[in-house]
């Protein structure tokens, strides 16, 4: 458990985490919203540094990245926790440890104990060795995915530096909810990102416990630094309003460029969200709107 970057010490051993736009003020013995940044006696600790919840060799198209080394595979690793609280999260078993405690699936414990219970240790050196060992299976490098990689900042930064130094590719699959300073520090070591823009309104983001603006800013900065593809998970009645889709598409075309790939992904019930899966009619309407301005629109989960 190493000391975290991007935080300030305050009076009474409180800390201010400056990694993401939540700007959590954390009292001693407590974790931030993401669960994995913990105030230990007035120092912020990165609980998930070097801890991995899952590791698989995936086709690059599964990230989804369709225009970045198509046909290759990539070693995909996940950590634990998330800084958004999407009620329809598909990976809530690793992204939302508090759900597991509330549901009685794991016993209540301190965050460090829970992180240990749900993950295995994997050093940066071991990760790089694994990535090199998988080159002969078509793997181009490592994708940080399955949960939110930015809250795993110190590990992702150190690993990405080491991977790049060995000629391996690095990918982030992210919600984009991060402050500019850490993003700028990490970007030189990242080759591609899939950024999940969950809806094109602050109203929608409020339901997830975030704001739209920082996500768009992340996409804008990343677009100048690495390959970027955007995902939008569509949920009938929540974010399928044509005006909202037009807003997103116009923003992508105008800010990132009309050649930016957009993945329109179909929602299926998950976590606490039980609404029926997104209708095919809504997906097709969104695809038609998007295709009028963007050159690559891909339907996912259909
Ligand atoms: S990274 Fe975690 S602790 Fe830090 S501000 Fe974001 S949610 Fe809070």
Image (cartoon, grey):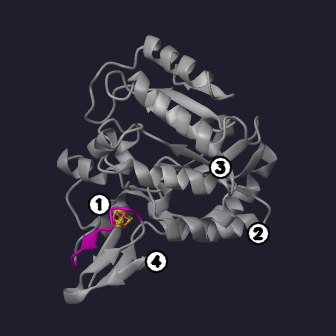
Q: Quadrant of ligand 1?
A: bottom left
Q: Tag 1, which secondary structure? A: loop
Which residue bears the numbered disc 2?
165
Mark 3 and mark 1: Cα distance apart in space: 28 Å
- Give residue 67's position: percent from left, percent from top: 72, 37
Which residue bears the numbered disc 4?
5
Q: Who comes first in sequence, dot 2 or dot 3?
A: 3
Q: Who comes first in sequence, dot 2 or dot 1?
A: 1
Mark 4 and mark 3: Cα distance apart in space: 26 Å
Q: Nearer the viewer, mark 2 or mark 3?
A: 2
Location of residue 240 (image quadrant): top left
Q: Nearer the viewer, mark 3 or mark 1?
A: 1
Which residue bears the numbered disc 3?
75
Q: Tag 2, which secondary structure? A: helix
Q: Tag 4, which secondary structure? A: loop
* Label annotation for residue 82: none
Q: In which quadrant of the rendered image does the N terminus lie? A: bottom left
| Left or right: 52 as drawn, with respect to 271 | right
How packed mark 4 is, by other alpha carbons closer than 10 Å (few <14, some 14-19, many 20 or more), is: some
Marker count (numbered): 4
- Give residue 107's position: percent from left, percent from top: 21, 56
Q: Who comes first in sequence, dot 4 or dot 1?
A: 4
Mark 2 and mark 3: Cα distance apart in space: 17 Å
Q: Residue at x 44, y 62 (%)?
A: 151
């Amino acid at each position: 458990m190493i000391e975290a970057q991007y935080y300030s010490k305050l009076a009474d051993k409180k800390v201010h985490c400056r990694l993401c736009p939540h700007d959590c003020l954390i009292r001693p013995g407590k974790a931030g919203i993401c669960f994995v940044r913990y105030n230990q006696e007035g120092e912020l600790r990165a609980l998930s540094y070097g801890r991995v919840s899952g590791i698989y060799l995936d086709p690059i198209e599964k990230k989804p990245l369709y225009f970045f080394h198509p046909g290759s595979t990539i070693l995909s690793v996940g950590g634990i926790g998330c800084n958004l609280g999407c009620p329809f999260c598909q990976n809530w078993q690793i992204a939302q440890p508090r759900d597991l405690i509330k549901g009685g699936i794991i016993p209540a414990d301190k965050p460090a104990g829970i992180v240990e219970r749900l993950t295995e240790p994997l050093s940066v050196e071991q990760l790089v060795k694994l990535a090199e060992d998988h080159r002969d299976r078509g793997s181009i490098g490592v994708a940080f995915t399955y949960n939110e990689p930015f809250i795993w900042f110190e590990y992702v930064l150190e690993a990405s530096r080491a991977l790049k130094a060995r000629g391996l590719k690095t990918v982030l699959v992210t919600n984009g909810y991060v402050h500019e300073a850490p993003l700028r520090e990490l970007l030189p070591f990242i080759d591609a990102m899939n950024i999940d823009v969950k809806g094109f309104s602050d109203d929608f983001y409020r339901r997830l416990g975030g704001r739209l603006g920082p996500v768009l800013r992340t996409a804008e900065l990343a677009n100048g630094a690495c390959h970027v593809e955007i995902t939008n998970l569509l949920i009938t009645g929540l974010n399928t309003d044509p005006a909202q889709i037009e807003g997103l598409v116009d923003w992508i075309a105008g800010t990132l460029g009309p050649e930016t790939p957009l993945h329109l992904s179909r929602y299926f019930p998950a976590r606490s969200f039980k609404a029926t899966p997104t209708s095919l009619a809504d997906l097709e309407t969104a695809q038609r709107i998007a295709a009028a301005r963007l050159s690559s629109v891909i339907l996912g989960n259909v």
